[in-house]
Every structure is written in structure tokens, then in C-alpha cells.
Amino acid sequence: MATIADLRQLVSETKPEEAAAMTGELLAAGHNAMEVLEEGVMNGLNDVGDRFAAKKAIVLDLVRAGVTAKACIPLIQEAFPKGEGAKIEKKIVLGTMLSQHNIGKNLVSTLLSIGGFEVIDIGEKNSPWDFYETAEKVGADMIAVSVVFAPAMEKFTELLDLLKELKVRDKYPVIVGGAVTSQKWADAQGADGWGAQAKDGVSLARDLLKVA
């Protein structure tokens, strides 16, 4: 019988078809959807990230891990009880600054959506202006930024400066996360919140937007 640990291994080995099939099998057997997501998919992704940090994996492995997670997530989303994703009237603009890497950002998007938030996902390779422009256009309540390599750190600071310059900084709580970030760095930049893991995005959003 398949276990969540088996799913974690398949995600870690970046096998999308096998991982999707096992995800369906686990959900059909009655496993909790959030446990399948966190302990299977997310932990498998973290395993790949840890290997990359230790120089035992390459960028292509990260890309393949993202593809594997993407194959599993729609199945998991469908398995959540309808009330668990009750709609919250709050819009969050989410994107990756500069980089094309999107694994963590996609997980944050999934968890926020499951949590009931309306997520406007602007994808990858964004500039500070892209975040501001989209937030203004859609009437966002918050901006969430994924920063996964050093050049994007400077651009995040530029985003906060841009919002101040345009006199809308107080209008948008801004949260950040990503491989190269830390609580100390986020605080120094003036971010309203920092997440070490994808699931932290939901708790930060609920706290900052005062959602009960």
C-alpha cells in the first residue's frame, strides 16, 4: 500500500507521472489532503532544494521538481472539503522577482487559494513596477514576493522604495520569502512579513489582513 513517504520519495526523484498517480491513490484511500500536500509534495520539494543547496543537484533538478509538484497539486486541490477553501474577500498579488524559478511561489499560491484568498499570480521574471501596476489594477490588499537569488534582493528593496515614492506603501502590506532571504534581511528592508516556508504565507496574510 502506498504511503505519503513514498510520494515524498517520488517527488524528490522528480517523477511527475508516478507522483501524480500515487497522489490520486493516497487521496482515494482517505489520506488527509493537507498531509499529502505538506508531508508528501512539499517535503519532497524541500529534499530537492536541500540537495541543490549542498551542490548535489542542478537547476534542472529544481525545474523537474516543480513539474512534478505541478502534476500533483490539482488533484490535491480537488480533494479539499469545500468549506475549507471558503472565499475570503481579500486579493493578493503574488509573483517571483526577476527569476524564472517558481516552485516555492507556486506552493504559496496553492496554499493561499486553498485558504480562501483570491490570488493574482503574475508569474516569474517580474520587476518592481509589475507588482505595483498589478496591485493598482486589481485593487489588491497585499503584495507577496518570492526572492530566490541575490540580484532580486535589491529589486525587492526597490519595490518598497517605489511604493513609498508613489505614496501607496501603507496601502499594501508586503511579504517576502525565498531561498536567499531571512527574517533579519526582511526586517532590515522594511517588509511587513517574512516566510521561511510556503505555509507561512497563509498565516502572514491572515494576520496582516486581519482575517479571523
Image (tube, grey):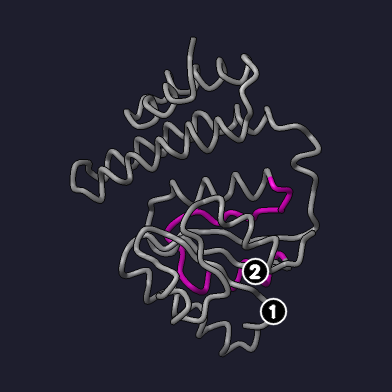
Q: Give the residue furthest to the top.
A: 1
Check residue 19 in the rendering and tell me which mark sits there, or answer none: none
Image quadrant where one finds the C terminus: bottom right
Residue at x 51%, y 66% (from the top left corner): 194
Image-quadrant location for residue 165: bottom right
Mark 1 lies on residue:
171
Residue located 51% across and 61% down the image:
195
Residue carrying label 2: 135
The spot of residue 2 in percent (x, y) is: 48, 14
- The reply, left or right, for residue 93 in relation to residue 124 is right
Amino acid carrying label 1: it is Lys
Q: Which residues are magenta?
A: 115-138
Q: Residue furthest left?
A: 55
Towards the viewer: 201 or 69: 201
Up-down relation of residue 55 to residue 24 (above or below): below
The residue that appears at 22% across and 41% down in the rendered structure is: 57
Residue 141 percent coordinates (x, y): 71, 68
* Residue 173 position by quadrant: bottom right
**In the rendered image, is residue 64 in sight?**
yes
- For mark 1, give the secondary structure: helix
Q: Earlier in the sequence, mark 1 or mark 2?
A: 2
Of 183 and 117, the residue lying toward us:
183
Circle 2: element type: helix
**Residue 94 percent across, percent down from the top left:** 57, 59
Q: Is residue 125 magenta?
A: yes
